[in-house]
Amino acid sequence: MKIFKFGGASVKDYKAVINVGEILRLHQDEELVVVVSAMGKTTNALEAIIASFSKGNPSETEKLILELKDFHHTIIQGLGLNQTSDLLNEITPIFDWLKDKCKGEFGDYDFEYDQIISLGEVLSTKIINNYLQNENFKSTWVDARKLIRTNNRWREGRVDWELSENLIQAEINSVFENGNRIAVTQGFIGHEEEGYTTTLGREGSDFTAAIFAYCLNANDVTIWKDVPGMLNADPKYFDNTVLLEKISFKEAIELAYFGASVIHPKTIQPLKRKKIPLYIKSFINPREEGTVIQESLAFDDNIPSFIFKMNQTLISLTPRDFSFIVEENLERIFGYLNTQKIRVNLMQNSAVSFSFVVDHSKINLEKLVDFFQEDYLVKYNSSLELVTIRHYDEPTIDRVTIGKDVMLEQKSRHTARMVLKDLD
Ligand code: ASP
Ligand code: MG
């Protein structure tokens, strides 16, 4: 059994869905669990609907829902499925539910978020499964909300592996025993104890693929992307990128941790535990080899990798009483960051100051300053770049620091990290 994952870009319009069908045709002799994200930018569109609903803006909300409905109907039409009443009978109630929901009371933000945001994956998998059946694939739709059990930390559900394993095995085994060859299911979504929908965090569909692989002891996982595989840098920021043909789980975890955005950071751990190889391949050139992430460390230091995080803010806290940055101060600082769900990209401390780097767009700086300023002198610096180089040497460092001021630097044996500011 193999697990395939198709992200939003690989199903962004009807032609992309047809392409997914063509890739699946190349693997007809396999049992496949196909994990799919919401189509194109649907998750962002749903976020806009949630924001509008939360602000009590009914006409705007309704307009946004109609746009999303049109977007999906255009795809359905392009696939020639608009005459298939069973698909429309499934899609229409989803939009009706959403419209009704948005006319009601808005409750807890994160709870409402999960109940609504999850519809993107439900819609995409309904359409894709119907298309595959229409193309005579032995495909069936599986509801991941019933199979992946998490706690009720909305928007960041933590997986209960044992319960999920039982649920997934029972369902998927019966799907294949009934003569199906393909199970189409949703990335990103699950349920909590009471049955409410939870999500695994933005871009969490890769992780879903890994959860299915782990629970089913799959042979391998393939993530189909719009890039040829894992590159040694993001081509947006770097010329002459090189394909990493083969790297270890350990290296991939490091790269994902430092912010390489090709795979979701949580994806590797479950695969590593069971030594299930992960392929990253191009959905544009599906016959190319791409990257394989596997157990052996032998190939890791062949090529230096560069990870760029833009729009970073460096924040420094100095206790006003000049107390040392030890357990008590750290506990306060991390306590706040944890309750605000703020991810720290890099941190460093001296005797009396603690500095950390965060994504500017993911924090409320004013609120943060407000919270700390009574007890700490708070300094910050925005519009910075955080660059990580794995398997660095001096020329690679020179290459990224040219024309920049290095505000903070950390080096270990394999990794150099620098916070940079443009010199201008
Ligand atoms: N659709 C979700 C998102 O855009 C999950 C995913 O694509 O992995 O974040
Ligand atoms: Mg995506």
Image: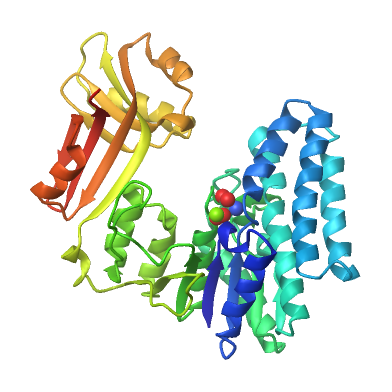
Q: Is residue 229 above or below residue 317?
A: below
Residue 154 visible at all: yes
Left or right of 170 in this view: 397: left
Horizontally, residue 173 falls left or right of residue 53, namely left
Instruction: Say if residue 195 shows up in the picture.
Output: no
Front-most of 307 and 214? Answer: 307
- Residue 305: x and y in percent read 25, 55
- Quarter of the image for residue 184 reads bottom right
**Percent position of residue 225, x then y:** 48, 64
* Quarter of the rendering containing residue 168: bottom right
Q: Quadrant of residue 171?
A: bottom right
Q: Position of residue 373 (x, y in %)?
A: 37, 11
Q: Residue at x 18, y 37 (%)?
A: 401
In the shown orientation, is residue 297 left or right of residue 52? left
Residue 96 drawn at (x, y percent):
87, 49
- Could you tell me which residue is drawn at 74 percent across and 73 percent down? 131
Query: Looking at the rendering, in which quadrant would you find the C terminus?
Result: top left
Q: Nearer the viewer, residue 348 or 154?
A: 348
Residue found 83% across the figure and 30% down from its top: 58
Q: How many marks?
A: 0
Tell me which residue sits at (67%, 57%) in the image: 121
Q: Indicate the colouring scheme.
A: rainbow
Residue 12 sits above or below residue 311 on the image: below
Q: Does 208 appear above or below 380?
A: below
